[in-house]
Amino acid sequence: MKATLQLQFGQHLTMTPQLQQAIRLLQLSTQELQTEIQEALDSNPMLEAADDDGEPAEKIDDTPIDYAAAEELLSREAGDGTDGAEGPAALDINTNESIPDELPVDSLWEDVFTSGSANTSSSGSGGEDDDNPLEARSAAPETLAALLAWQLNLTPFSDLDRAIGMAILDAIDERGYLIATLDDIMAAVADPEDPDAVEMDEIEAVLHRIQQFDPPGVAGRDLRECLLIQLKQLPENTPSRSDAIAMVRDHIALLGARDFASLMRKLKLTETGLKAAIALIHTLNPNPGGRIGSVSETEYVTPDVIVRRKHDRWTVELNPDTAPKLRVNTGYASLVRRADSSADNSYLRNHLQEARWFIKSLQSRNETLLKVSTCIIEHQRAFLELGPEAMKPMVLRDIAEEVGMHESTISRVTTQKFMHTPRGIFELKYFFSSHVSTTGGGEASSTAIRAMIRKLVSQEEAKKPLSDNKIADLLLAQGIEVARRTIAKYRESLNIPPSNERKRLL
């Protein structure tokens, strides 16, 4: 065949760095976005924060960013397996999501959708603690082992008793329980040349001394001993102290089985006395080591959008604290000269273009977030007016079709974005849920069903709590047919124990 040269015209999508930036900004959380904006302000002299001083901002091209085309390109490249510098790998986002058309009845958002930004952080992790030693010291929680060792060093012990104490501390787990037997501790401290130098009575005496350390209940060998240690440390005039000690010491199995009738008979207590003793036991900590080193830094959530009711209508607006206004520095922009290819002019021109695109990407992110949030509120007005029990079933496709965007774009917009409503602050993904068909031919949201379960449990009789089958029957009476295993899964997701553990004395 003869080689020929042909000229063809065509169109194809290209994942440019600017489009990558737009998609990355779209999925950032509020804190990550603020960090990104600060980094852009520090690195680009053409960018500055608008301080409302009356200076007109440069008009930015308001052509909307084609997120749909970007999602199509991302899915195509993910399907082709390409791994270029401009492909999905460079975005560090999960673009190969499989979003089903219908969610299973007992599904949760976390079981179906994932977010690439959930496990990433835009901020550094190393140097900040070095610059703030006091904050670093307070941020590092004290361990149980360090606390016990500190108390051991302050206690007057002989050398042998201190060695026994160290062996006991080594055998205490993170819960605060002693997991080794006294024979094992004796073998650990015994002198091979003089095996009889350490007696069991001495080990028990050191253990008893350590059991008086803080936190109360530490070094107990089981739950019974742990609770007894705490009860015996209470003042002797504490009401119901003796009854609680007898109950834990002799009948803890009946207490665990909630056999209140047998407890009243064996302890010769009235219902009032039994109730007082159990109430005292409930004040104890069955996991004494759990509160040491478990205090995490408080995390505050700043809502991205705010929902208010104005003139009998629900309105949605961006939170100004999370949507700072940026503009191009007109002073530096005026230095850019046309037809000048010098290095300085190229530097200014490139940064000017980056600043304009960053502002455009930020504006497009805010507009998309506002559009999606408004659409969600239109679907879930009943929730705002009546509460979670009125939540309507909704999936990503419902919002995507209404706003004309790809489902993956909706997934990015609604992850780690929060909405402030009169009923509290919720992540946008909270408003999406699977549905259950009703006997009347309608649909009920799984979120609404969870709210109904919580309400039924809160109103149940303490002596006769509702079983999962009974809850299913009560929901069926309201026209909602849900299987017992689904009720159990919803109940567990609400951290509601089963009926036998919810049984209480009146």
Image (tube, rainbow, N blue to C red):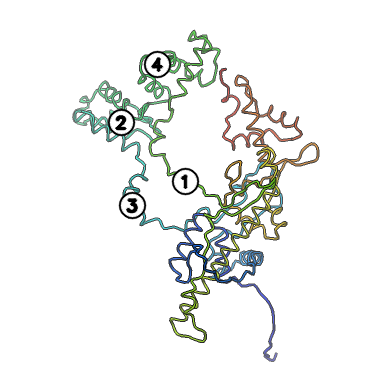
- Say what amino acid the circle numbered 1 marks: Glu
Residue 84 in view here: no
Relative vertical location of residue 50 with respect to residue 210 in this rendering, above or below:
below
Between discs 2 and 3, the one toward the N terminus: 3
- On the question of residue 102 being in view, the answer is yes
Task: Determine the secondary structure under disc 1.
Answer: loop
Q: Position of residue 222 (x, y in %)?
A: 41, 25
What residue would you read off at disc 2? Answer: 168
The residue shown at (59%, 52%) is: 305
Q: Nearer the viewer, residue 120 or 425?
A: 425
Residue type for callout 3: Asn
Eye-nearest disc, 2 or 3: 3
Cα–Cα span, label 4 and label 1: 38 Å
Residue at 58% across / 68% down in the picture? Answer: 19
Q: Which mark is residue 459?
A: none
Which label is found at residue 238?
Answer: 4
The quarter of the displayed image where residue 61 is located: bottom right
Q: Nearer the viewer, mark 4 or mark 2?
A: 4
Residue farthest to the right, as pictured: 440
Q: CA distance from mark 4 to mark 2?
A: 31 Å
Total labels drawn: 4
Residue 469 in picture, x, y percent from top left: 68, 28
